[in-house]
Image: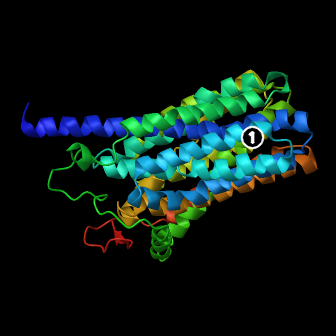
Amino acid sequence: MTQTAKAQADSLRWASIAAAITFVALLVAAGVRAAPGVLIMPLELHFGWDRATISLTAAIGIFLYGLVGPFAAALMQSFGIRRTMMAGLTLMAAATFASQWMSESWQYLITWGVFSGIGSGAIASVLGAAVVNRWFAKRQGLVMGILTASTATGALVFLPLLAWLTEGGEWRPVVRVVSFACLALVPLVALLMPERPADVGVTRFGETENAADPSATKRAPSPAIAITALVGASRSPTFWLLIGTFFVCGLTTNGLVGTHMIAFCGDHGIPPVAAAGLLTTMGFFDLIGTSMSGWLTDRYDPRRLLFIYYCLRGLSLVALPFIDFGALSLGAFAIFYGLDWIATVPPTVALANRTFGERDAPIIFGWIVVGHQIGAAVAAFGAGLVRQETGSYSPAFIAAGIFAVLASFVVLKLPAVRHSIDDEPGMPGLQAA
């Protein structure tokens, strides 16, 4: 083996370790964010809280999950990826564990809405973007697709177990399982997660030894980095188009389906375990779809991919309230919708990288995720309110589907861009491709 081949093999090995640990952390964080959807009916039964009150906590958690993202990305550049991950996991573990003694709805809001939302915001899509940019010079779309798919895998792993634990109206076992899963990851990250390639004597995978590492410049610890990046990005129309379309992405995924699908199925006589199995099927197919989306993003125009994803997702959501909720029709929906659940992330990250540069893109993508989570929070609370006022989730699903179809045409307005190395760091590169 030549020296160059050995160096590339070492780079791939260490990059794979970093990506694997990140995948597991994102998987557990996804389990935390999925748990409120399982808890809706048990909490309603045990405490007598109404659907809108419970949905509000889910909405606040989702919103903070997004809002913390850009600040977490800034901390990853200055404080370190490993330390930021450990802090987020510890906060999630403590908040969810404390919630087992709650007796009032405001306590649920504080533990699962505020503190769990903040903790999970440090273990979010921005973490995947930061790790991909720091460890991979090639195959970024594919790796981002795999890491993004961990959200679906989180549903695949956790939801059937969590739904089974709620049989008989129990809710505390769900809290304990989620809390211990977060806590168990802290020592794993502390011992095995390398901070950056140079610390283990390698370069980014696919990069020559004399190439510049976008993470090499260490910044002073300051949340102002996130604000500075936002000010620079806000001058670009691409930034606002990406935020707007990602708002719709959140509106049509974790805020609506992720939070309310089990309760929606319950309205049609489907028990929680079976409904969780439906979400698990979606998660399995999203694992395939999002990974494939990353592969496609490395090869095709991300804008055209986003057009297809949003259009198909919208049509499936509009059709859902009109099916018979039998095993065959629900299975078909789970496969069709699941393949497209969060396939939008790799193309969106690619557009952010090409527009804003690899150093600042994780922070700016964090702000784009804020748009996603605002949309998700609107859907989480709004769908619960619609169900409470009308007795049906159907209007919420139809409206979300229409927004997705509209978003599919908006993405075609995004300019084709590539980032130029001559652009000033921190400023958007807006050269036409």
- Which residue occupies the foreground of this view, 161 or 187? 187
Quadrant location of the C terminus in the rendered image: bottom left
Point out residue 165 in the picture as x, y percentages from the top left corner. Answer: 74, 23
Please give the name of the residue rendered at 50% of the width and 74% of the height, measured from the top-left corner.
234
The residue wearing badge 1 is 99
Q: Locate residue 294: give its quadrant.
A: top left
Point out residue 80 in the picture as x, y percentages from the top left corner. Answer: 40, 53
Q: How crowded is mark 1: few (under 14 residues within 10 Å), some or many (20 or more)?
A: some
Q: The disc labelled 1 sits on which kind of residue?
A: Ser
Question: How has the structure been colored for display?
Answer: rainbow
Is residue 25 left or right of 330 when viewed as pictured?
Answer: left
Q: Is mark 1 on a helix, strand or loop?
A: helix
Relative height, residue 34 to residue 380 (above, below)? above
Please give the name of the residue rendered at 51% of the width and 61% of the height, measured from the top-left corner.
70
Is residue 129 left or right of 90 when viewed as pictured?
Answer: left
Relative height, residue 94 to residue 386 (above, below)? above
Question: Is residue 192 among the parts visible in the rendering?
Answer: yes
Point out residue 319 in the picture as x, y percentages from the top left corner. Answer: 73, 41
Point out residue 37 in the picture as x, y percentages from the top left corner. Answer: 74, 38
Question: Is residue 402 among the parts visible in the rendering?
Answer: no
Quadrant location of the N terminus in the rendered image: top left
Q: How many labels does the image show?
A: 1
Please give the name of the residue rendered at 85% of the width and 52% of the height, measured from the top-left corner.
385
